[in-house]
Amino acid sequence: MIRMTEPSKITGVPDHQPAAGGIAARARASVGPKYLTGLNPEQRDAVETLDGPVLVLAGAGTGKTRVLTTRIAHILSQGRARPSEILSVTFTNKAAREMKHRLGQMLGQAVEGMPWLGTFHSIGGRILRTHAELAQLKSNFTVLDTDDQVRLLKQLLQADNIDDKRWPARMLAGLIDGWKNRGLTPSQVPSGEAAVFANGKGGKLYASYQERLKILNAADFGDLLLEDIRIFREHPDILRQYQQRFKYILVDEYQDTNVAQYLWLRLLSQAPSSFTSPRVRGEVDLRSKSGEGDSPSTALAETPPLPASGEREKTKNICCVGDDDQSIYGWRGAEVDNILRFDHDFPGAKVIRLERNYRSTGHILAAASHLIAHNEGRLGKTLRTEDQDGEKVTVTGSWDSEEEARGIGEEIEQIQRQGEKLNEIAILVRASYQMREFEDRFVTLGLPYRVIGGPRFYERAEIRDALAYLRVINSPADDLAFERIVNVPKRGLGDATVQMLHDHARKRRIPLFEAARAVVETDELKPKARGSLRDVVAQFDRWRAQREVTAHTDLAQIVLDESGYTEMWQKDRSADAAGRLENLKELVRSMEEFENLQGFLEHISLVMDRDSGADEDAVSLMTLHSAKGLEFDNVFLPGWEEGLFPSQRTLDEQGRAGLEEERRLGHVGLTRARRRAKIYFATNRRIHGTWSTTIPSRFLDELPAANVEITESKGGSAWGGTGGYGASRFDDMEAFGSTYSTPGWQRAQANRNKGGSRNGGGGRGGFEEEASNFSSSSSSGPDFGSFSSRRRGPLTIEGELVAKSTGTTSEFSLSDRVFHQKFGYGRVTRIDGNKLTIAFDKAGEKKVVDSFVQRA
């Protein structure tokens, strides 16, 4: 008889305990709730570590949202807390809705009873309404938007006899918002900061504003957290209630929190038993330190831990998810130090790094990781992938921004011809004014596009205003344009005056401008309004006369200056005022490509007429800041030059901290790409209205050579291929490039051989016009002394006409086979008046006017 060996003799452990790492243990570890399936080890660790403070450093594309929602599901399924005992804070309502939706899918039911899952301000507002009387408010208080806030501040400035033009209300609103983001009440504002507005009256006006809000039973967005903090500090019993209520706290995008959000979280994250004083760590030295010129973050960094009652401070189960390498919102108050100091704020915190990227290829990740490694202020992690290395990151130099736009446009068309969707292509710019040339280029090519995070260039308010001035000069009968700017900037011509002009114009059947000319000769208006309107009429008469003897670009600058429009934005102290001024300069620059004002305005009407449906397959155009959280197969990153990226303004204002944030912005841009990342820089760019020779961004030298490929611009070069970018395909213009055999190209060659003029032949396409321009350039290289003489002439672009419909009915039918001289053969897929949508065999889908195609 065979004797069985006892389990303990084999394993060396009691028989009731399986061997560590044994088959049974591994099999048991693999068994778990379905929502844990598919998590990698680091993700699972972040989900299952439920006790104590946890910081999850989640790099781009590492599954941050999945970890956060799975952690909540795990807490609920394990019975560690009820839904109402979990505080989960996000930055956007969209993120909160996404989390609730995912939780419903994980738990197999709709998630209900989670009242504390939302944004900082929505949850802060709910707490404030519950205790409104402690903030001298009623529970039904109104939350003011920015416009209401500025209007109220204007009233306070007038009451204090402060000149609103010298000290704009919008500037004061920005100061107050900044103080509230740092958790400063009126009494805590450093005297040095209060002195920057109205000769030291900033603090007093802040206090008056807060008092006025109480009288109106109103609060602004900053109060939703600031008043909570004050209530928690002054009423420890109320704070203790919330500390006892929330067993778990989860925070998304922790790297984007400002000081007020940090203090709000720090108060709630303390264990109830440890709280004996309304003063908590990090609170205080803001007042004294800021007065000495230090930043709030510096004050927080120097504030030592303050244990309660001499004992080690206790914290609850708080989990913050974020990425210090993606902190790019310092300009609006975000403090990257909040995440860098997490283990200091929460002693014994566990830091879990999510480094496996599920989005980008190996070369892209290596380039992004190597770039961000040059930052000193980071906790450190290296993104990796188990997928293919893919294509290398490309770096392409171009002669100027126009060539840059041409090259990117051609690359996008090539990608489209390969069958890829335009929805998977994005262009990420550092400054919004860079978008203009791409928008113009896409209209020329017939490429659909959308602008994310803001209006298209020509739809921006400041551009529409400037264009309205030019439209009235060009056509005095343009009532819509005249009505838009008659009181912009403010001239005391309100709604009553405009209504009087409308009545007069209707009765006499004349345009508003002529009605204004007639009304100023009567006594119908009050003297002040009549004088202002007379000045407006006189200005337009003068500008219209100057139009005949002044270049249209110079005229535009004169109009913006003499009308006071430029000065209006120069005095505006809001965060976006500088960007608006840059856009106006870009508008004037864009006019140089056109022969006269009439031609420019016709071009604008074509651009504005372009309709883009929400579901349309289109290229995405946005700033780097707007791209955070998005991803695309193909990402183009133009403008990597010193002064533009990194931004010189940011470097001047913030020094090394600004440089590191700019580098994080580059990291964010690269990690938006799944398959291809393409970087561009230009040697010449118009800056503040003046052509400047630029140098490549320092960030290019910080990319790893092994993961980067240098390529030639596909936009051609008007300077014979010199400049260090290799030979251009346009260098040998005598042969006219045998690669191009389209009828349009052949016609351009014939025109050239006949000695046709540069601007002749109105039927030529944009591509043919460019070839003619390049052929007229010397092959001996750039001559900087004759730059202006070699500047491109006005464009007569066939592609511009594709966006304009005359309202007539097309003679073509769906599925008709047609031929276009530039795009080749294709089939009609959609008809809108005389506009046809055609699926071309090689060029992809384009919109064209039917008069430019013929039946095949």
Image (cartoon, rainbow, N blue to C red):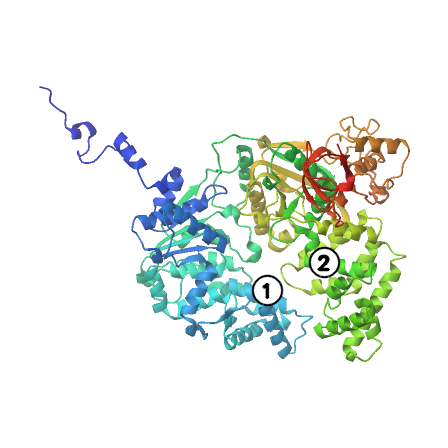
Q: Report the front residue among 834 and 233.
A: 834
From where the camera sits, is residue 574 visible? yes
Name the one closer to the observer, 200 or 6: 6
Residue 420 in percent (x, y) is at 60, 35
The quarter holding residue 417 reads top right
User: How many other residues sit within 10 Å of disc 2, few (<14), some (14-19) or many (≥20)?
Assistant: some
Q: Does 640 sit above or below residue 457?
A: above
Gap between marks 2 and 1 measured at Cα? 25 Å
- Whether label 2 touches label 1, CB < 8 Å: no
Instruction: Provide the residue designation for mark 2.
Output: 464
Q: Secondary structure at mark 1?
A: helix
Amino acid type at mark 1: Gly
Instruction: Return the mark for residue 174.
Output: 1
Q: Quadrant of the N terminus?
A: top left
For the C terminus, the image quarter is top right
The picture places residue 37, in percent across and down from the top left corner, at 37, 38
Name the side, left or right, on which 274 lies relative to 603: left
In this picture, residue 130 sits left or right of residue 459:
left
Q: Nearer the viewer, residue 621 or 723?
A: 621
Give the total number of marks visible in the rendering: 2
Q: Is residue 317 left or right of residue 442?
A: left
Marks 2 and 1, the one that precedes in the sequence: 1
Seen as rendered, the residue at the extreme top is: 1
Q: Amino acid at mark 2?
A: Arg
Residue drawn at the location 58% of the way across and 69% of the way down: 149
Mark 2 lies on a secondary structure that is helix
Residue 115 in picture, x, y percent from top left:
39, 59
